[in-house]
Amino acid sequence: MKQDFDFFKTTMPQTRKADYYLGCLDSSVFMDFNYSKDNRISLVRISFDGYGCCNVEEQAKPLNHQDSQKFIKEIRKEKLNQEATEILVKEAIRINQAHIWTDALKEYRLIEF
């Protein structure tokens, strides 16, 4: 059965700075993304209910240029395309999974095993 992530755009307090914020899974997971000077998107922080906040910032690997442009196009829409957003989010997580808690990623089914 396919997971229904139900991604949504959100905001965060001033103490949690990033350029873009997404939530999913009934607000159980929140992700923060930054837009770099070279026009690429990086996952800088992800928080999970029951686990806390995992900072990826220093080690963050950005999406490639093509996926970064897709992400920007998607995030600017009024309503997110769930399938496109899922692909981009999962790719951002995949390339940074060494810096994110595996147990949390498995529990919330954000990576494939």
Image (spheres, rainbow, N blue to C red):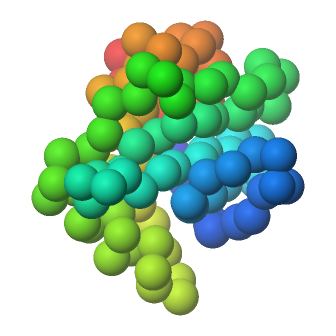
Return the x and y of residue 74 as percentages of the image width and height: 38, 73
Q: Visible in this render: residue 47?
A: yes
The answer to which of 56 and 111 lies nearer the viewer is: 56
22 versus 49 height, above or below: below
The answer to which of 35 and 21 lies nearer the viewer is: 35
Q: Residue at x 16, y 54 (%)?
A: 65
| 3 left or right of 35 in image | right
Return the x and y of residue 58 as percentages of the image width and height: 49, 23
Which of the 4 image quarters holds residue 96? top left
39 versus 3 height, above or below: below
Q: Report the number of discs.
A: 0
Q: Residue at x 45, y 66 (%)?
A: 82
Return the x and y of residue 47 as percentages of the image width and height: 71, 33
Q: Residue at x 37, y 39 (%)?
A: 92
As drawn, which residue projects farthest toward the front? Answer: 37
Return the x and y of residue 25 as percentages of the image width and height: 68, 49
The answer to which of 75 and 6 lies nearer the viewer is: 75
Which of the 4 image quarters holds residue 72? bottom left
Q: Residue at x 71, y 66 (%)?
A: 10
| 54 left or right of 96 in image | right
| 22 left or right of 109 in image | right
